[in-house]
Image (tube, helix red, strand yellow):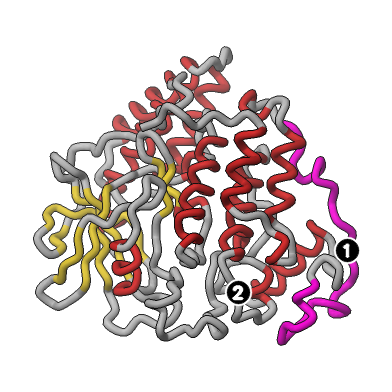
Amino acid sequence: MAGVADWKSGLPATVRFENVENIQKGIEAAGEPSKAKAQKAAFAAETEAYKDSHSLEAYTAVCLAHSSTASSTSPTSLPIAPAPTRTSSEPSTTIGPYHPCHLIATSPVSCVYHHPDSTTPLAVKLITTSSPTPPHNPAREAAILKSLTHPNIIPLISTLHDSDAHLILTFPYYPLTLATALTLPSPPKLLPLLHDLFAGLAHLHDRNIIHRDIKPSNLLLTPNRLVIADFGTAWHPKLSTDEPRNQKCLDVGTGAYRAPETLFGDRKYGTELDMWGAGCVMAECLREPHTPLFESRGAHEDGNQLGLILSIFKTLGTPDPSTWPSATKLPTPPFEMYATFPAVPWKTLIPPTSNPEFAGKWDQLREIVWWLVMFEPGYRTAPEAAMEMLELAGVKVDGRE
């Protein structure tokens, strides 16, 4: 959309420089002794926010999150920026009864807008297609969310239709994702957030619901915790009538977070699919820099699935019937099809970092990741067990509202 670029052309350089200065002050307050290094990091953070944001509000929120995160010393309070005030240079539109609305994200089936209500800022999700194809199903997304009440799952505030009969879903507006938080000079405490992720998955899996797209950008940070969002491709044992239990869609998950069973034709997969994604997220949180455990090309590129398969095999080692016994029954078994690669040692994949949050816990944290990214789905640890392992490693999650 042309409007997305308009806000950038109308943004004064003085405003951008002011944001750089604020981020720099936060970095220095967090303990960076070198003014030059703080300024360099601040310029990099502001530039990334400017490049990746779809609206002035999103850009301002990310800049505020950068500056407040860097200067925050609280172990439980997360750096969520307040919704900024709209300026005249910012594009806006009306979605149903909500005005103004500012575009922040698009997908093949929807557009998501920020509505800066003075009482409750909203994320307004407009479904743009009347014939979504599996695994996308906005009506099912709404029905699933209406059935869920949990502090680590995004609450659905309302559903309605606009004048063109397009479905509209509204949620609380949380501008910071885990993906963005991992790019900040001083990220929030990550282990309690991972505990939140497992708690949310436990609630889903107790009901045999599979999210099917666990990744950092679908994990939102509220002022106190992490919530799982974007249930647009979720599977429900009763509501997913177009996908029988043993004939589920394979085109689920995103890039480096896709589970291997979907890459080899297993349509009977279960909730263990989400645990692979959670393991990939946890590994990314522990690595420095925070890069994905596996490499994946864009979905539009040729050979993207083959590239991901090879990356998984080169990282974890080529599977065999002992590490993936159920794969012998897959339509496309992974054995004797590729060169045999040895597994990379976990101390190499996730080496110790300077983050004091992880100090003294490396063996326990690597073990959790190891139990999550097992080739055999039945071997992967359940979310409740992952939570307990974090608690045994000394992760404190009490005292948060």
Please identify the quarter of the rendering in which residue 88 is found: top left
Vertical order, 43 against 316 (above or below): above
Is 324 on the left-hand or right-hand side of 228? right
Q: Is residue 147 magenta?
A: no
Q: Which residue is found at the position 53% from the left and 27% from the top?
A: 40
Vertical order, 130 against 141 (above or below): below
Can you give x and y, in whole percent of width and height, for residue 150 in the image? 37, 50
Judging by the rendered image, the residue that carries numbered circle 2 is 269
Is 105 on the left-hand or right-hand side of 31? left
Q: In this view of the protein, which residue sits in the foreground, 328 or 180?
A: 328
Q: Which residue is found at the position 74% from the left and 66% from the top?
A: 376
Q: CA distance from mark 1 to mark 2?
A: 25 Å
**Disc 2 element:** loop
Judging by the rendered image, the residue that carries numbered circle 1 is 341
Query: In this picture, which residue range is highlighted in magenta?
Result: 325-352
Q: Amino acid at mark 2?
A: Tyr
Sooner in the amino-acid sequence: mark 1 or mark 2: 2
Q: Nearer the viewer, mark 1 or mark 2?
A: 2
